[in-house]
Amino acid sequence: MTSFTDKAHSAEHLMRTLFPATPLQRNDHLSEVYEADIWLKREDLSPVRSYKIRGALNAMAKVLSHSPETSVFVCASAGNHAQGVAYVCRHFDVKGVIFMPVTTPLQKIDKTRMFGGDNVEIRLVGDYFDDTLAEAKRFCAEVGGHFLSPFDDPDVIEGQASVAAEIVEQLKSLPDMIVLPVGGGGLSAGMTKYLRDVAPHTDIKFVEPAGAASLAAALDAGKPVKLARVNNFVDGAAVAQIGRVTFDVLKTVSAEKVLAVPEDRICSTILEMLNVEGVVLEPAGALSIDALKDLRTEIKGKTVVCVTSGGNFDFERLPEVKERSQRYTGVKKYFLLRLPQRPGALKDFLQVLGPDDNIARFEYMKKSARNFGSVLIGIETSDPENFETLYARLDEGGFVYSDITGDETIAEFVV
């Protein structure tokens, strides 16, 4: 019986028929910051700017080798999986039908269509992904096609394991630690299964977005469970329930090896890599690098590999990323402020601002029958400690205000 390691090596060789190995690059900036030897496995530099092409290629190749008469491949995805499937459909010159939610950004639809060309049909169905997935599976059964899961498929898992095989070959030695992003678990299951055999002494850390910690929930329950609520900001890893096939591999992982990182902090890492290194990463692609902040003392002096899983970043999201980063680092806050409705009231407020405090947003609604009006105000500053001075001045001036920066409910409507 062929071992999983051999299957991963076969998958790695298969990848070379479509694209060269993605680079494994030492990052001098991160190495200096963390006093360690930090390497990045640049899956964001694959032909579709994510590792998803690997699982799609391996799975599709196996299906066609066993059932060459397969007439259509079907998937449901709003992102990287769709693009990987489209690219491979064109490579094998087979038909693919890709279901996407109606709400999918046009940029992602256009890229999927570009990769697939005439081999791919895109169908926009449903406002929510669950509806899209259900329709994709219904259609697949109706036409007798093959459904390509984004992660919960043994052939997909084997394909993703080729990332680990490349790392071991490229590094020429075994790293002390590998940091893996986790969504549905395809990449982490494949790499973990390979590394357990080839590099049993390499420490593996698993990183999830705090608002979609499906692996941690499954480990706690002893089985995959569906999260009641998911924060979709890290869309490439925001999965409500980890796969059953992938969890069968990951169920022996120690819970202390699984890290949850805040979505807003990831934004700071995205900006750091963009501004300092010129590396464009999507939120899921920045997960493993962001986790280094929690591993600082543990990795000092060690060789660490971070998998940057994707770089399909829509630059229309950049203002939101900057906003989230500023709020997380404490240099931007939002307030609801009561101002007396009299001449000079605004001037009085402006006097309490410090030299580094800037008004980034100001909305005032005058109430003709009231003595006070409400102001939504956003303030940016150079140092979080400046807000302590501002609070003191506001209190001294008798201003009535509420800091709503951390109130997700209010912020969702007004920020």
Image (cartoon, rainbow, N blue to C red):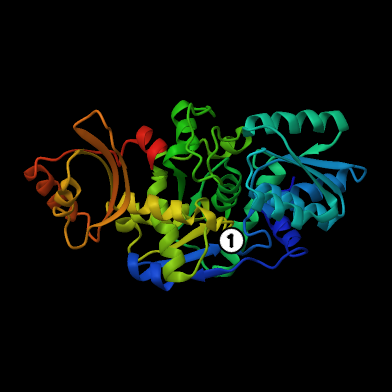
In the figure, is residue 16 to the left or right of 258?
A: right
Counting from the top left corner in percent of width and height, residue 19 is at 72, 65
Quadrant, the N terminus: top right
- Front position in the image: 341 or 263: 341
Counting from the top left corner in percent of width and height, residue 308 is at 53, 58
- Front position in the image: 78 or 5: 78
Counting from the top left corner in percent of width and height, residue 344 is at 16, 48
Quadrant of the rendered structure where residue 365 is?
A: top left
The residue identified by callout 1 is: 44
Tell me what residue is drawn at x 14 percent, y 46 percent.
391
Counting from the top left corner in percent of width and height, residue 98 is at 75, 42
| Residue that protrudes farthest toward the left in the picture | 396
Three-letter amino acid code at disc 1? Answer: Asp
Image height of 214 relative to 200, above or below:
above
Tell me what residue is drawn at x 87 percent, y 54 percent.
93
Residue 203 shows in the view? no
Image height of 409 relative to 359, above or below:
above
Tell me what residue is drawn at x 54 percent, y 33 percent.
240
Q: Residues within 10 Å of mark 1 (few under 14, many from 20)?
A: many
Tell me what residue is drawn at x 44 percent, y 51 percent.
320
| Residue that protrudes farthest toward the bottom in the picture | 28
Element at badge 1? helix
- Front position in the image: 177 or 91: 91
